[in-house]
Image (cartoon, rainbow, N blue to C red):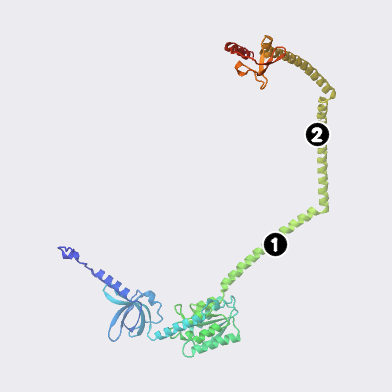
Amino acid sequence: MTLFSEHPSQQRDIFSVSRLNREVRAVLEGSFPLLWISGEISNLARPASGHIYFSLKDEIAQVRCAMFRMKRQRLRFQPENGQQVLVRARVGLYEGRGDFQLLIEHMEPAGEGALQQAFEQLKQKLAAEGLFDSGQKRPLPPFPRTIGLITSSTGAALHDLLTVMQQRYPLLDVVIYPVQVQGALAAKQIKAMITLANRRDEVDLLILSRGGGSLEDLMPFNDEAVARAIADSTLPLISAVGHEVDFTIADFVADLRAATPSAAAELATPDQQTLAAQIKTLHQRCSHSLQQQLNRNKTALNSQIRHLQRLHPQQQLRQKNQHIDELELKLTANLHQQIGRFNSQIELLKSRLNSHSPAQTISWHKHQLSNLTIRLERGFRQQRMGDQKRLATLAHNLHIASPLNTLDRGYALVTTVEKNEILHDATNVSIGDRINVQLATGRLHCKVEKYEKRKKLLSKVKKMIEHNH
């Protein structure tokens, strides 16, 4: 169920003008890619900001255009009202006025479109063949003696090249190979001069150069024959065609591309001031190194002189004599020390010998023997008296406990013949058993014919025997 408010304005999504323009701009910019558009320039304006504003029109319609300063600086021509141009642009909206407009990224005269397409096609072809590979590039000589200039003999590029070379490296020789740098004959002449320079082999490096111009003006340097002549050259070649923003096929094939003719002269030649500074630095380093080497040699020489002085026979003799004196003093001191030690040892040995004299030892042992003899006799007597006393006590105790002592009082010890067991009870034998009767003196071998049970008598005898034991 949907509930509707009583206030309709609360359900509406109301746009402000700025929001509307912002969202329309987003829709336009997101709906169109970069477009190529051709038309005629009108209402051209160049404010101080460096941007340019104009309309692009055809027979039926027109659209406002804006090209900002950073993009405008890359133009190779000066736009004018009434000029037919080809632009690459993004579709947009200027939010401040709600104006539909094109934001120009690139602009060229209308006739350059086909030339640009041919340039791209040739570039792809030669790149696929490997003519642009870095592995094909030849290194530039660091100190060329002669440089060949393939350029117009009347152009500003030649003047710039010669001026910079003269300033940087006056020792350089220059060979000029004059050619036309634009027009129908230019490509053929350029190719011929590259071939001629390689055949004559009179220079160390070639510079192919001209000033800036439109894409049509630079077409001789986008020629396939010129590109292949550069690739086949055995001489290193620098391409310096146009301004910094201009690129040609010759730039890609050459061993090095320079942004301008002056830059090519700087890349091709060493700077005399830099060389002078380097030579000065090397001279200082050599002088410093030589001075250090001289100092080291002087130190080594002085060391060798001192060494020779030390090795001189007279010096050696003095050293030996001094050493002999030192050894004599050491020997004398050692002898005195040895004699002192020997005397001390002799006295010690005398003392020990006296303390270990046989007479004293014999006297001491005699005294010890006398004392031990007295102690031994006393011990023997005491031991004998103690043993006699203990023997008497043991004999008395043995006599008291001995069955023989009981037998002396008239008792007898009765044992069985078979098992030799002491009989305590008359009932332990049977009629006819043989028994032994031990008396105080002698033994009786008896045979049981009769026995009586007398408990009290047996108990008394048993106690008496146990008491005796």
Relative to residue 376, is residue 171 depicted above or below? Answer: below
Q: Residue 311: which disc?
A: none
Residue 200 seen in this snapshot? yes
Q: Which residue carries the number 1 mark? A: 294
Please determine whether, in this image, residue 63 is positioned above or below residue 345. Answer: below
Name the foreground residue: 81 vs 383: 383
Q: Residue at x 65, y 65 (%)?
A: 287
Query: Quarter holding the N terminus?
Result: bottom left
At x 80%, y 29%, the residue is 348
**In this view, which residue lies farthest toward the left?**
6
x 30%, y 72%: residue? 26
Label 1 sits on what residue type?
Leu
Closest to the observer, 183 or 127: 127
Q: Position of residue 54 (x, y in %)?
A: 31, 80
- Residue 67 at x, y percent in the picture: 35, 77
Q: Which residue corresponds to mark 2?
A: 341
Q: Nearer the viewer, mark 1 or mark 2?
A: 2
Left or right of 386? Residue 148 is: left
The residues bearing labels 1 and 2 have C-alpha atoms spaced at a distance of 60 Å
Q: Nearer the viewer, residue 385 or 56?
A: 385
Kind of residue sitting beneath label 2: Arg
Image quarter of residue 108: bottom left
Residue 463, horizontal then vertical, whole percent:
60, 13
Q: Earlier in the sequence, mark 1 or mark 2?
A: 1
Q: Where residue 456 sits in the image (x, y, percent)?
A: 58, 11
User: Relative to 66, does residue 353 appear above or below in the rendering?
Assistant: above
Number of labelled discs? 2
Question: Which residue ends up furthest to the top in the rendered image?
Answer: 409
